Image: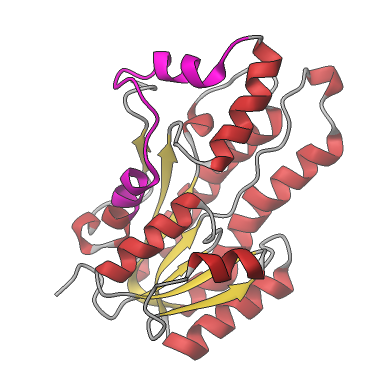
Amino acid sequence: MGLLTDKVCLVTGGAGSIGLASARRFLREGARVMLSDRSADALARAIDGLPADRIATTVCDVREATEVRALIEQTVERFGLIDVLFSNAGNAGAIAPLEQYPEDVFDDVYRVHVRGALLVLKYGIPCMQDGGSVIITSSVAGLRGDPGAYAYIAAKHAQIGIMRCAAKEVAPRKIRVNTIHPGPTRNDFQSALESQLSTALGCNATELFDQMTPLGRHAEPDEIASSVLYLASSQSAHVTGTRLVVDGGMQG
């Protein structure tokens, strides 16, 4: 028996590295998985070679309530009530001084991370089994402040507020709600962010992050997925309303 045998797991942002690595871990532990992302092509590539009887995909833009509702409905129709709701969709925004920060970028980052997480929980939790687990991907950025990263850092802080409110509201149903806070992780998302930071700071941001991390390196997506699995499974049965930091000691 796996940690998630016959559990139904929904993953947004599922074509990205952390979402896909987590979905693969869920599958290895016996789960059935609905994977969503904005790109049908990316989803098709993501599920290549995965067990077709236990995984399905749905294109969804988490900024849009109608699409989120449809995602939840399709998940329940395909697999049944949800046991694990993993709100993982995200975008990076811009790095710019305050007086130059583009307002449209700020708004879009907030719509993906904050409105998106709210919508996934708003429509997903009523369709969950009692005793389930909700996980929101925040970041070490949600625990700190850095010049120029206004949208991303503000949005990641806001997700913690959503988590804390929801954790108390759904506790009577024994549903747990937590945020996970990856540090720098080796993937395309982080590479794009570090490219912007390198330009803004005038140094190699990748090397800087490694120097700031006591363990001396970026995380691998599978390492973040291991912590997601912990929050998804009964191993964290008494953990709710908390922030799980997986950053190699960066925030220590």
Q: Does the magenta stretch mainly form a helix, a strand or a loop?
A: helix
User: Vertically, is 137 above or below 39?
Assistant: above
Q: Does 218 appear in magenta?
A: yes
Return the residue nearer the eye: 238 or 41: 41
Q: Residue at x 24, y 76 (%)?
A: 5
Q: Where does the magenta region start and end?
A: 203-228
Q: Residue 181: horizontal and vertical position, in percent? A: 43, 39
Query: Residue 87 appears at what percent x and percent y?
Result: 51, 58
Q: 107 left or right of 119?
A: right
Q: Is residue 150 magenta?
A: no
Q: Residue at x 79, y 19 (%)?
A: 98
Q: Residue furthest left?
A: 1
Q: Nearer the viewer, residue 226 or 48?
A: 48
Say which residue appears at 51% left-offset and 90% top-offset. 77
- Residue at image coords 54%, 50%: 162
Give the answer, above or below, for where 174 lies relative to 229: below
Left or right position of 84 against 42 = left
Residue 101: % across, % down: 81, 26
Q: Quadrant of residue 9?
A: bottom left
Say which quadrant the N terminus sits in: bottom left
The spot of residue 226 in percent (x, y) is: 29, 50
Q: Considering only vertical position in the picture, is 23 above or below 67?
A: above
Q: Is residue 231 left or right of residue 34?
A: left
Work out whether residue 174 can be spotted: no
Which color scheme did the rendering employ for the protein? secondary structure
Quarter holding the C terminus is top left
Tell me if residue 8 can be seen. Answer: yes
